[in-house]
Image (spheres, rainbow, N blue to C red):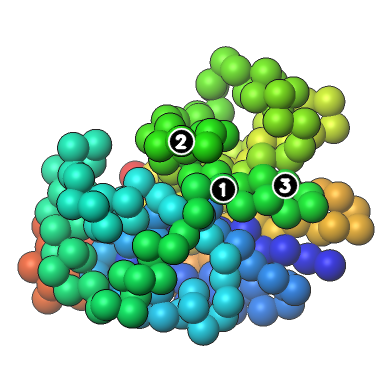
Amino acid sequence: MKIGIISDIHGNAVALDRVLERLEGCDEIVCAGDIVGYYPYFNQVIETLRKERIHSVLGNHDYSALTGDLRELDTYGKVSVTITMKNLEKKNREWLDNLPLMIQTPYFNIYHAFPSDSIDALMNFIYPSFPLIEKILEEEGKNIVVGHTHIQFKKDFNNLTLLNPGSVGQPRDGDSRAPFAIFDTEKKEFKFDRVEYNIYEVIMEVERAGLPTALGLRLLEGR
């Protein structure tokens, strides 16, 4: 059995569609949150996740779009989430509102940002250099999947792995291709992959939606 792992789509349906093409052979797909924010295809992205029955946890941008609490967002996040709130269809808002903070699978637990059963699950950052990764894995006693940083990486400790599949919609690790991961349940191993997509299509849609031009241009450098 193979499980596709994605995160931080951020309303970028063009990137998502290419990633899902690459994950067609997977038995199921899971997402580590931040479905909306930054890019303008938020309704389309949610409808795709619903149609494909992709289970996801809640992300901090998703939370902000539901609550109107923008305090933790950067300038571009505030602008884009405000547009999302105004234009998010009712059925898609209801779907977003039912997302959990954590998903347990037999193979790994999924959080958006940090292992917690509180709002900390959405807000704290785990970068590759985070000093407590080994302690977190030891306390969890299970593989962990997180997103939030938009950086694809994994750390291993005592046969356990903490993994970030990277951001489908807005990579920040210097590679403009849309990242994702696959877990093989028989081999018990995670593998990373990436796929190119039409960034210029997203840039043009960013302009049409009245979003900051910089949101589109940053995709070219993966920053």
User: What amino acid type is highlighted by mark number 1?
Assistant: Met
Q: Earlier in the sequence, mark 3 or mark 1?
A: 1
Q: Residue at x 12, y 54 (%)?
A: 79
Instruction: Name the element at disc 3.
Output: strand
* CA–CA distance in space, label 3 to label 1: 11 Å
Q: Earlier in the sequence, mark 2 or mark 3?
A: 3
The image quadrant that residue 65 belongs to is bottom left
Q: Nearer the viewer, residue 138 or 79?
A: 138
Q: Earlier in the sequence, mark 1 or mark 2?
A: 1
Q: Vertical placement of 139 versus 208: above or below?
A: above
User: What amino acid type is highlighted by mark number 3?
Assistant: Phe
Q: In the rendered view, does 59 fall on the left or right side of 72?
A: right
* CA–CA distance in space, label 1 to label 2: 10 Å
User: What amino acid type is highlighted by mark number 2?
Assistant: Ser
In the picture of the structure, the residue carrying the numbered disc 3 is 108
Residue 142 in view of the camera = yes
Q: Residue at x 60, y 18 (%)?
A: 132
* CA–CA distance in space, label 2 to label 3: 19 Å
| Crowding near the residue tagged with mark 1, few <14, some 14–19, many ≥20 C-alpha atoms within 10 Å | many
In the picture of the structure, the residue carrying the numbered disc 2 is 118
The image quadrant that residue 53 belongs to is bottom right
Tag of residue 102: 1
| Crowding near the residue tagged with mark 3, few <14, some 14–19, many ≥20 C-alpha atoms within 10 Å | some
| Residue 138: image location, x then y, percent | 74, 23
Q: Nearer the viewer, residue 66 or 137?
A: 66
